Image: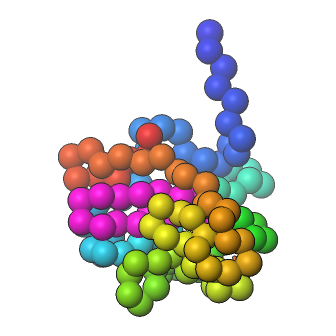
Amino acid sequence: MTIVSRANPAQPEPGARLCALEEVADPGSKGFRFREGDKLFAGFVIRMGETVTGFVDSCPHAGWPLTMGDNYLTRTGNRILCAGHGALFDLEGRCVTGPCVGDRLKAWPLTVENGQIVTA
Ligand code: FES
């Protein structure tokens, strides 16, 4: 028997469908929240064409969610913005401007299967 220890029981198991790829603007982003008892998991996805990248929605500066809603990208679409104190992250999740320069957003592994965004 294999027992898998998950840091946050609210984080969806691998293979969980999040939404259709078409439900995320291109380029664009979308936030997700999952609850298990008193635990909450927050994550978001960034879409660039057929490529989707997932991150845990927790800023390395203060641990706050980067935003409320689905707008994680700057107007130019080439940076991720934290509304807390204005940190900017590149699309690989590295902070390039702001109070946590050099820190990274935690990856949330995802894949696209048959047009659906799925946890990996
Ligand atoms: S919480 Fe994100 S920059 Fe401060």
In which quadrant of the rendered image does the N terminus lie?
top right
In which quadrant of the rendered image does the C terminus lie?
top left
Quick check: can you spot residue 42? no
Q: Decide which of 22, 54 is in the foreground and name it.
A: 54
Q: Decide which of 9, 89 is in the foreground and name it.
A: 89
Taking the spot 38% from the left edge, 87% from the top edge, the residue there is 76
Stretch of the chain drawn in magenta: 43-58
14, above or below 47, in the image:
above
Quarter location, residue 34? bottom right
Give the image location of residue 46, x and y in percent: 41, 66
Give the image location of residue 11, x and y in percent: 60, 47
Quarter location, residue 64? bottom right
Give the image location of residue 14, x and y in percent: 48, 38
79 with respect to 3 (left or right)? left
Magenta-drawn stretch, dominant element (helix, strand or loop): strand
Q: Decide which of 88, 112 is in the foreground and name it.
A: 88
Q: Farthest top residue?
A: 1
Total marks in image: 0
Quick check: can you spot residue 26? yes
Is 44 included in the stretch rendered in magenta?
yes
Taking the spot 66% from the left edge, 20% from the top edge, the residue there is 3
Q: Farthest left residue?
A: 114
Taking the spot 41% from the left edge, 72% from the top edge, the residue there is 29
Quadrant assignment for ligand 1: bottom right
36, above or below 72, in the image:
above
Is 14 included in the stretch rendered in magenta?
no
Q: Farthest bottom residue?
A: 75
49 with respect to 105 (left or right)? left
